[in-house]
Image (spheres, rainbow, N blue to C red):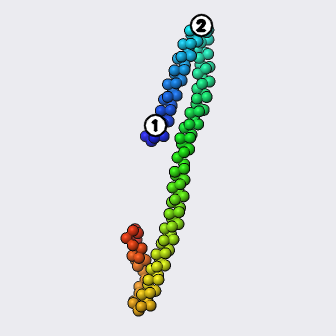
Amino acid sequence: MSDIQNQIINIIAITMAMCFFCFASSWILFELKGSPNSLKDTWTIVSSLFSGGAALIAAYIASLLFNDWKEQHNKSILSNEAKIIFRKISESYLLLATYNKSLDRMLGNSVAFSINDIHNSMGPEVVPLV
């Protein structure tokens, strides 16, 4: 399981344990005071505490889930910038290959311009053409 799922499961378990503790302690207190409606009063108090706690826990879980968008957003921006840079470098290599072939033509060498010449001018870092 992921880290966020573990945190959410832990939060729910802690919340359930706290609710059970609040229920048991308030019921015992109402019974000791001799309240005729001890169970009803216990449920009223525990439900009030649980609703407030549930709102706070939901906000905390939302903040755990919301904080992950920043990393993904930054990577998508970097991805777009990397694509732009790669296109510019590719255009530069094409221009250099064209100048290289033009220079060969000017020197009197026979020139056959092909895509493999452009690929070879890009160096070994580029993925081979299929």
Residue in the image at 47% along x and 83% along y: 99
Residue 101, compared with residue 56, is above or below; it is below
Element type where label 2 sits in the image: loop
Q: Could you tell me residue 65's position as x and y percent?
A: 54, 42
Q: Is residue 47 above or below residue 92?
A: above
Taking the image as shown, residue 121 lies to the left or right of residue 31, namely left
Give whichever of 40, 29 is nearer the camera: 29
Element type at mark 1: helix
Tag 1 residue: 6
Q: Quadrant of residue 130?
A: bottom left
Picture residue at 54% right of the left edge, 50% below the top: 70
* Residue 43 horizontal/vertical position (percent): 59, 19
Q: Which residue is mark 2?
A: 34
Visible in this render: residue 130? no
List x then y, in percent, for residue 51.
61, 28
Sequence-wise first label, 2 or 1: 1
Query: What type is the residue that disc 2 sits on?
Result: Gly
Give the amino acid at mark 1.
Asn
Q: Residue at x 51, y 55 (%)?
A: 75
Q: Is residue 53 visible?
A: yes
